[in-house]
Image (cartoon, grey):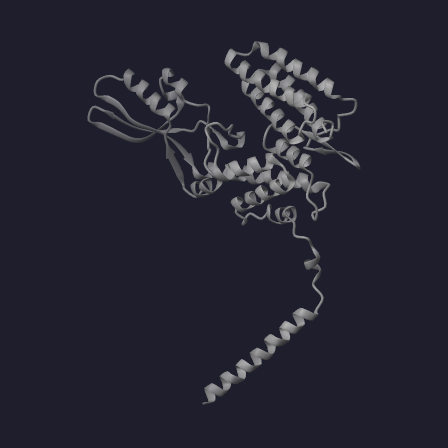
Amino acid sequence: MPYTLAFEATKGAYSRRRRWAAVRSASDPPSSLEHVTDTLLHSLREHVVDESQPLAGLLRKCLLLGAETGSDALRDWARKELTGYGDEDEVPKYREVPCPAMSMNSMSGSTWTANQSISRLQMPRETWEYLPDTLPFTEPIEQLQQLSEQKSLNFTSEGLAAAQAVWNKKLGPFQQIMSLSFVVSGSVIAGILGQVRTHLVDIVADLTSENPLSELPEKGKVDAAVSNHVGDIYNTTIRTAAGPVAIGAKAQATTQGLTVEGTLGLLDKVQEAAADIADAQRTELLDALADLRATVESEAPDTGDVVKKVGKMRALADKVGLPSVAAAAGGAAQAITELAVSGAFG
């Protein structure tokens, strides 16, 4: 019986403490922390620099933030990072790595050689055209996280298989390349994840630099931040009631005196520079220019749409590799983006 009495006494004390705590919770004023409006932007700001926070969770918050602000640019980027990039998508530069070393298994007579490390320069020149300069990693962010935890990764590609076939045709009797595979360390994948997090930090920093954490930023500001740090990396100037806000290490407020008609003239310069490009690339760039021009000249252009099409034009121009084209496209891209986010297009 002593055990039963002790238990009943303890249970009664616990009940009294629980009732007192309930009364205190209902009567006491809320703490100052309860007055803070926990917006998506506030949550991102609090957690984006916390290395223990999974990237996938932060990107899902970006999906919601994009929906709340109407920013398709932020939603598209976050969604592609979460679900992976498709064949029709342009993979961001930070997801590409230089063509890595390869591992080769080969046979010469009765001698078998396994896991021999080779580079492009050790392969016949005829095989080089099948080897990419860079390798894109298109997998979803959570899959990349798992891959980064491995010591090394071996994988092949259609191009590498073609290079192996060409090489085998050049070998003599009783010699054969049995397999070729790229070898990438897990730390390389971890580096990609680090860049995604850094881009996300930059975006959130831009959005909170002149914006109260309790309020959502405007759509144009979100689109510009994404384009500035994720798409084509060029500087953007945003106009606010307090004056120009420069985004980026070298950004300057340079929209004074710039007009929509003037930016169309810059597009003409890009088109002129494109005359020196090969037919296939020129057609693709000219189509992007025409699409951008049509949007700019429309009756009520959407700021996000303008910024997105500017990014596509700039990316195609950079892909060509001609300094004259890249310079013309860069000037036009910065000018049009500055006008777009300052409200010049409505």
Left or right: where does residue 304 sit relative to residue 244?
left
- Residue farthest to the front? 299
Please state the horizontal and vertical placement of residue 203, each as a whole percent of the image.
Answer: 63, 38
Left or right: where does residue 206 sit relative to residue 117?
right
Q: Nearer the viewer, residue 136 or 117?
A: 136
Residue at 63 percent across and 15 percent down: it is: 270
Q: Nearer the viewer, residue 107 or 238?
A: 238
- Residue farthest to the top? 275
Q: Nearer the viewer, residue 175 or 157?
A: 157
Q: Is residue 42 above or below residue 304?
A: below
Please state the horizontal and vertical placement of residue 92, each as a whole percent of the image.
Answer: 53, 30
Which corner quadrant holds the N terminus? bottom left
Q: Is residue 120 above or below residue 51?
A: above
Please state the horizontal and vertical placement of residue 332, each as a whole percent of the image.
Answer: 67, 20
Kindly indicate the quadrant of the structure image that contains residue 320: top right
- Residue farthest to the bottom? 1
Which corner quadrant holds the C terminus? top right
| Total numbered labels | 0
Q: Is residue 52 above or below residue 33?
A: above
Please state the horizontal and vertical placement of residue 313, each as a whole percent of the image.
Answer: 60, 22
Residue at 47 percent across and 31 percent down: it is: 86
